[in-house]
Amino acid sequence: MVHPSILGRSEREGQGRFIGVMLAAPFFAAGAAVTLVTSGMGAAVTMAAIFATFGLCWFIALLVAATGKMAIAGRVALAVAAIALGCLIAVAGGPNSPVAMLALALPFEAWWIGASRRAALWGGLAAVAAILVQTLAGPMLPAAGVQIAAWHWLVPLAWALTSMPRISAFRDHDGAANPTDMSVRLEDIIDAVVMRVARHGEVLDASAKARAILKLPPELLCGNGLFDRVHLADRVSYLSALADIRDGALSRRLELRVRLPQNGNGVTADNYRPFSLEMLRAEGETEAFTLLLRENDEIAGLREDLAKAKEAAASAEVAKGRFLAVVSHELRTPLNAIIGFSDMLLHEMFGGFKDPRQKEYVGLVRDSGHHLLAVVTSILDVSRIESGVYATEPEPFRFSEAVDMCQSIMRLQAQAKNIELKALIAPDAGEINADRRAVQQMLINLLSNAIKFTPDGGQVVIGAKRIGSRLHFWVEDTGIGIAEEDFANLGKPFTQIQNDYTRKFEGTGLGLSLVKGLVALHDGTMSIESMPGEGTTVTISLPVNGPKGRSADNGGVLTMPVAMGKGDRNGSLRKTA
């Protein structure tokens, strides 16, 4: 008959005992009334009292069974019992009557139902109230003061017989603690919020430490109050742990974030703090479980340190970019002078050289100046992309024209190594809306790398085709390829893949990094397929209609994530960015 909303075992047992007492009490009261009241007050009054007792007690029992709320009903029942017992003692002859021993029934029954010292104390106060009622009501009752007889002992003896089996049945639970009392003692030992939850996660009760730890009254956690405050990303792990407990696990522990009131003033906001939650289930317990919610200061400290480290790294990255930009800018001016004057000397504008070695040395100075200027320009471009200030000016142009221009620039370098440079541009490649200079820079850097790492007599192919709204173009070579362990470092600034074979190749490692940045500025993608000894293919996909609007603060692209996996052909490695 216990209401289904009562899930805790102790609460269900308490309400079951209360309903049982209220259903059985009218029978005991009827026997006592027939024995003690009929002779003094008549059968009609006795029957009326019996029917009133049955109606009131059974009404209270049914009310508790229907609602599951026993607090008010228990107080009403205790008050009615005190008044009825006081009148019964007065009718039986006063405090000297054996019936007066029934005053012990009130604290016993209260303890039997509530299973706590507090309940027994309230029963004791009710017994005192019964004695006072007997003193006040005795002179007003017509049947009061009857002569005490030996058969009056039957009433307390009958109650004693009903209490003995209940005492023996309750001995098994003498060492067991009430969940509420356990929560209080557990809360004194550990710094945590102790909660009882039902099978499906509804909080039944929470300890008072919720005010100090969560800045919340405990009643706000009841029902779905706790679940509603768990961070959305942590709810799946919370429900999974709860399901494990329901399925038989004795304990589960997890980390989650709980939303707290802002500044403790009751105004909710996105103020999430990390907590450690431990779920516990007692042996044989299937309807309710215990939760221990602790503050996770260690995780909070680590997150704060991580945020500070990220901020420091970001500041260092910005400072590095600014430093490289300033240094590169300052180097360009003297380099232009070196290159310009060395060109003038090589053309013998101010007279010939007396020694051929002089002209050779001036040529070396000019070539070194050009190389250094190219490096400085690449550094400056990378710094601009990282800082988000690289300006792109999209315009429509035919992609084949950009390929022709890049081929003409790189043809001499390819011929020097007897490398065949081919172009396979599909007729539907057509026009693309992009920054012409940036696209040409991509092609030149990719061709330069392909020619550099392709042995003499090899082949480099530029291909392009249109797929839907995107243009795919690639540079394929028959060079040395890339080992699997080197894929993670591809595209990092100032990083060149080094092994026994590639160690002899010069370079700063900025070419592929710059290509990555330019591709990202155009909302494009880049993938690399390679197999050691068989060559490398770098494929770029750009939107034909041009990149979408991009603000300056998100132009940095060299920190984009990359993924490496197996390719589709011959077990080649593939990396996408």
Image: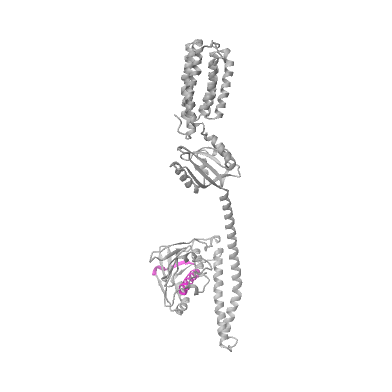
Quarter occupied by residue 214:
top right
Residue 426: percent from left, percent from top: 39, 69
Reply above or below: 307 against 219: below
Residue 166: percent from left, percent from top: 48, 26
Q: Is residue 60 left or right of residue 340?
A: left
Residue 395 in the magenta stretch? The answer is: no
Residue nearer the viewer, 280 or 202:
280
- Please, what is the dominant secondary structure of the magenta stretch? helix
Q: Is residue 538 left or right of residue 381?
A: left
Reply above or below: 171 against 377: above
Tally the numbered discs.
0
Residue 50: percent from left, percent from top: 47, 17
Which image quarter is the N terminus in? top left
Residue nearer the viewer, 434 or 376:
376
Q: Is residue 308 left or right of residue 22?
A: right
Magenta residues span: 426-452
Residue at the image position 56 percent from the left and 60 percent from the top: 553
Residue nearer the viewer, 34 or 330:
34
Q: Is residue 552 left or right of residue 564?
A: right
Residue positioned most to the bottom: 354
Residue nearer the viewer, 78 or 464:
78
Colour style of the rendered protein structure? one colour
Residue 441 in the magenta stretch? The answer is: yes
Residue at the image position 51 percent from the left and 31 percent from the top: 174
Reply above or below: 497 against 83: below
The answer to whether residue 124 is seen in the rendering is: yes
Residue 63: percent from left, percent from top: 48, 27
The answer to whether residue 36 is seen in the rendering is: no
